[in-house]
Amino acid sequence: MSTVEISGKSARDWLDDVLGLFPQNRLTLDAMRLIPASDVPAPYARLLVHDHHMTVTLEAHCGGPVALDVLGVRHRGDDYARKLVLRAGSASGPIVMVGVMRFLLQNVRDDVRSEIVAAKTPLGRILISHDVLRRIETKAFLEVSLRSPPGSLFSAPQASAFTYGRIAVIFCNGEPAVELLEIVAPQPPPGSDGALGGDDVSRDAATDAATDAATDAATDAASLTVPRDPDPGGV
């Protein structure tokens, strides 16, 4: 796993670079461990070990839409990065994912670029709605200590010591356009009650979201706002 490269860098060097974009309350490298896909436990494997948008995967898991909450932005020319959380249902819902996104905006049309920079809609939904030709490659998987800064953002099950995440790259129109660090909320053990983020999900809503996810996955296959002060948490 140490040989994994993202944009010509080792996974650890890439993480150090990306996390350094938002230094306040940042997640440190010693809070993370690179692991192979086979070591990602259930139910995290279903959430992370795939080549689809996390937006779609989390909507299916939560049984409804997820809302974008931006914690900080760095925007210099075509280089756009943000630290973010996704919340179940609405801007006041429980956090279901924390992450960092870095986007080379020259790889998308101006209308797509404007909607990304507006930071109102999760990235996956924007790329799907604009029918951007895209391909997602998952590069590495992470075990993340909940004693690190992101742990304070989650409502973690009492017995949880770790959660899990991934590093992924999205190719837009054939070019590597987006680099992503995505860490999902701690999950109850298999067989127990509870959903990601702590929301109760109706069976009908979950079925509808899963249908939407399958449709979006098939579509995939076919084809600076100022940071808040103080920073409420870090990744």
Image (cartoon, grey):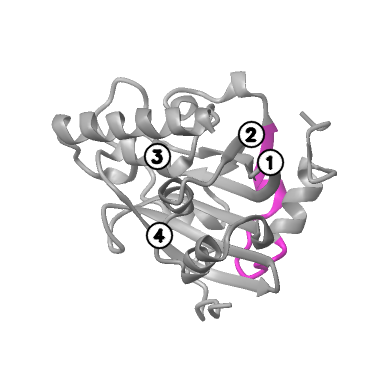
Q: Is residue 79 magenta?
A: no
Q: Which residue is mark 3?
A: 56
Q: Label 1 neighbourhood size at 10 Å, few (<14), some (14-19), many (20+)? A: few
Residue at 40 percent of width and 49 percent of height:
129
| Magenta-tinted stretch | 20-34
Name which residue type carries label 2.
Answer: Glu
Instruction: Tell me how far mark 4 sits from mark 1, CA to CA.
Output: 23 Å
Q: Mark 1 and mark 3 in contact (Cβ < 8 Å)?
A: no
Disc 3 or disc 1, which is closer to the eye?
1
Among numbered discs 4 and 1, the one appearing first in the sequence: 4
Give the alpha-carbon distance from disc 2 to disc 4, as whole Å: 22 Å
Residue 115 left/right relative to 102: left
Q: Amino acid type of disc 1? A: Gly
Is the C-beta separation of discs 2 and 3 under 8 Å?
no
Between disc 4 and disc 1, the foreground one is: 1
Mark 1 residue element: loop
Task: Check disc 2 and report its element: helix, strand or loop.
Answer: strand
Sequence-first disc among 2 and 1 = 2
**Closest to the observer: 233 or 70?**
70
Residue, disc 4: 121
Question: How many angstroms separate mark 2 from mark 3 (CA)?
Answer: 15 Å
Task: Please state the horizontal and vertical placement of residue 11, each as a whole percent of the image.
Answer: 76, 41
Q: Earlier in the sequence, mark 2 or mark 4?
A: 4
Q: Say if mark 2 contacts mark 4, CB within 8 Å.
A: no
Q: Amino acid at mark 4?
A: Thr
Query: Circle 2 is placed at which residue position?
Result: 137
| Among the two numbered marks 3 and 1 on one chain, the one whose residue lies closer to the N terminus | 3
Dots 2, 1 in contact, CB < 8 A: no
